[in-house]
Amino acid sequence: MAVMYLRKKDGKLEEIGRTEVILNSLNPSWIEKITVSFQFEVVQTLVFHVYDVDTRYHNVPVKTLKLKDQDFLGEATCVLSEIMTRPNRTVTLSLTGNVRAGVNRNLGTLSVLAEETVASKTVAEINFRCVNLDNKDLFSKSDPFLRISRIVESTAAVPICRTEVVDNNLNPMWRPVCLTMQQFGTKDTPLVIECFDFNTSGNHELIGRTEKSVAELERLCLQKEAVNFVYPSLSHGRKKILKGQLIVDRFVEKVQYSFLDYISSGFELNFMVAVDFTASNGDPRTPNSLHYIDPSGRSNSYQQAIMEVGEVIQFYDSDKRFPAWGFGGRTSDGSVSHAFNLNGASYGDEVVGVEGIMTAYASALRNVALAGPTLFSHVVDRAAHTASQSLSQNSPKYYVLLIITDGVLTDMAGTVDALVRASDLPLSVLIVGVGNTDFRQMEILDADNGRRLESSTGRIATRDIVQFVPMKDIHSGQVSVVQALLEELPGQFLSYVRTRNINPVGAPAI
Amino acid sequence: MSRKIEITGISAEDLVYKKRRVKKNAYGAFDTAGKYMKQPMRTSVDEISGNYPMWEDKLETEFSPGKEAVTATSVMYVQVLCRSSAGEDHCVGTARVPVKDFTGEYALEGFLHCLSYRLWDESGCRNGIVNFSVRILPDKSHLKSGLRLFWLR
């Protein structure tokens, strides 16, 4: 029997599941599958323990077996993303065990196969229509739109999507709405569908609402029924049932290729780093500096950010060669550069592995003087250049540029121009802010409020490629702020490939 | 030296005409100064969506980059017009697209450039965004032994 654990941050093992017991075999092939949630933003270390189950326990439910009563046969460890990046999603590990030093025993191997459940790739495409809505506008008709939210914890509702606004129409028909399983949870999770009248002031008036789960919407479509909206009335506490009705014209369930489908077909994520070498960080030799390398081994904010992002992404990069740059520093030839190679070489900006980045960073701190000003445009251009060069190669790569900075941008316009130019390429820019400055400019670059970046020539960013997070508290508990950055990455990657109708390598269009 | 160029008008956003949101019947037109294209290209008219029209029309035309001195500053004009019930076409906004944005630094033959530009109306005010994609179709003679590059659709 095999038992699977997840190794948590503190080193403790958390049991995830067990296989069944296969009797009398030295080469067992288990059938029982163990389910685990794939999280892109953390390194998920899986630990497997294989046991020999004593005859006494052969007919006992596997869950109740006490592991210390069984014979331990061996242990194997691997990282979940390692399995998912292989083309056949299988990895074979050698078992190790408690053998005395010097004893060389072959304890056998364990093969692990992982596959993504189809349910998590399902997307529901729904065409909504309404009839007989109430008129909320004075001189014209309502401008209705729908907002769909998911009920979390029995009272709070989290909006998951909005339709477009249809002008001046009490019987509107909207374009199809696509809901992923990640958004609606399960087909039976209740969703709140509200119909609002759009007002340019932002104060949209509620026309009516209804609560239906995805399964109920499917039923409405099949049986060609309509559901009436209700209006929560403040007096009497009773709800008023309105004449307005919601109709589901079309309900189609599709399967979309997921992030893991692309990864295991050969797509790679290439990591690039840019480190802020401006004087505002403070002299690296003083303990107050953001660049201070503590001899006791505690990482500074820069090292922490590089480790956390690099450790996750390195599994998705086959050659583990990462370009690493610094900006705002005065190099050995006396001039200030905004995209100098961290490894100090005059050719070749790549280092090998996350350790390579750390070594190059430490040596650059000794050889490069901090200067200024803070400019991102050069490193963004370098990253964009690298990404565009890779387009002419035959292997599909998506680039991730991590910029770690402590300060305020001097040239906002130049940076925006560089980002807009790069927005059409397979590139995402993750910005981590260290220190205590006001990072308001970064929030503008992040464009999460929906205002797309506009360059000085009138070009608008094709998509939002920037994600920003301030690393204010590096001692925070379980969830790291950098994880919040990484969570967005699969979504950005998918929006790039899906807009261009690019399927996983060799996969047919669905 | 003329190439085939494929332009797909995708959509436009936030169109305002005479202080009101555009109701319907908007379409896009692509044209270049200097007559590099055979004829101005137009998308179909979107009759349903008001100020967020979606076209998804593929338009193909010939394109001659022409002499060196002129290409550096050559420009393509993208206009969004709306057809009123009387049949007249009003220009809602124009965007000025430097041709080198899709033939310049990041250009590979065949790469699909998805571009978005700010629209400016006649009085010089911002009036929405137009989204379109451009691709220069690779010349057959340039394809090396039929090797299909990955990112090119």
Image (cartoon, coloured by chain):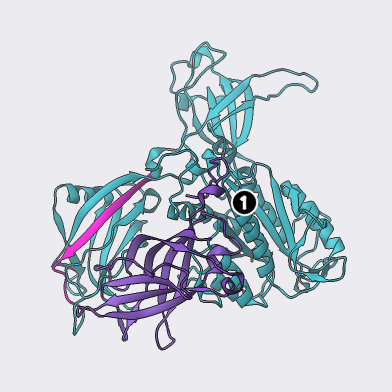
Q: Is residue A467 visible?
A: no
**Left/right of residue A35 with respect to residue A406 in the rendered view:** left
Left or right of residue A153, residue B150 in this image:
right
Tell me the kind of residue under disc 1: Ser
Based on the displayed image, in which of its 4 quarters is residue B40 positioned?
A: bottom left
> Whole-percent x and y of residue A455?
55, 74
Image: A282 above or below A249: below
Q: Quadrant of residue A442?
A: bottom right
Point out the stretch of residues depicted in magenta: A122-136
Tint of chain A: cyan
Q: Nearer the viewer, residue A62 or B11?
A: B11
Is residue A241 located in the magenta-colored stretch of the structure? no
Position of A190 compared to A436: left or right? left
Quadrant containing the C terminus of chain A is top left
Q: Which residue is mark 1?
A: A390
Residue at 14 percent of width and 51 percent of height? A224
Q: What color does chain B have in the rendering? A: purple
- Find residue A264 and report its horizontal and vertical position in percent: 53, 39
Q: Nearer the viewer, residue B15 or A444?
A: B15
Query: Magenta segment, principal secondary structure?
Result: strand
